Image (spheres, rainbow, N blue to C red):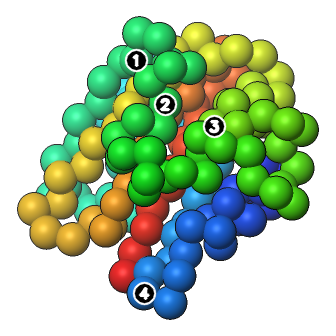
Amino acid sequence: MQKINDILAVFAKANSNYHSASFYRFSKLSENPNEDIEAAFRTNPDVKPHDRVDTTLLQNWRDELFTKYPDNERSWLHAEIDGYPSKGKAGKDYIIDLIVETLGSLPTDVYYVEVDPYGYYACSDEEYIFKTNEGLYLYSMQTHD
């Protein structure tokens, strides 16, 4: 898990500037793969009790990941970046491969998570839960000003 988080930290830094900071992470939410997806997500300290949380099962997760924002806002995900260890792949494909490598297998399900905090949650966010036979994992990209 350390490898993917080290690389996500580099990507987050590349997507930050003097007006905002980005925080990207991949973490285990639950050892129980059958835990309720929303309940597991609510263990995330960024989520407040009053926040509305909606989860959507992705039908074709490889294509549906990282699509919330236009390409110009997450352009580093859609192009190879000089100096990044992406092995000739676009950032999106490289991150997907790192997720699968970290999980040790393909996920059984992937959920998109949308948070409505009725106020501030993040300037931008894109979060997913990966379900495997070993548990639930959170992939989170947030930008804050």
Badge 1 marks a residue whose secondary structure is loop
Label at residue 58 = 1
Q: Quadrant of the C terminus?
A: bottom left
Q: Which residue is mark 4?
A: 19
* Front tag of 2 and 3: 3
Q: Position of residue 91 (x, y in %)?
A: 69, 42
User: CA–CA distance between discs 3 and 1?
Assistant: 16 Å
Are discs 1 and 2 less than 8 Å apart at CB? yes
Work out whether 134 lies above or below 31. above
Residue found at x 69% / y 31%: 93
Whichever of labels 1 and 2 marks the residue nearer the N terminus, that label is 1
Q: Which residue is mark 2?
A: 65
* Front tag of 4 and 2: 4
Q: Which residue is mark 3?
A: 92
The kind of residue tagged 3 is Lys
Are discs 3 and 1 less than 8 Å apart at CB? no
The kind of residue tagged 2 is Leu
User: CA–CA distance between discs 4 and 3?
Assistant: 24 Å
The answer to whether any part of residue 106 appears in the image is yes
The kind of residue tagged 1 is Leu
130 or 88, which lies in front? 88
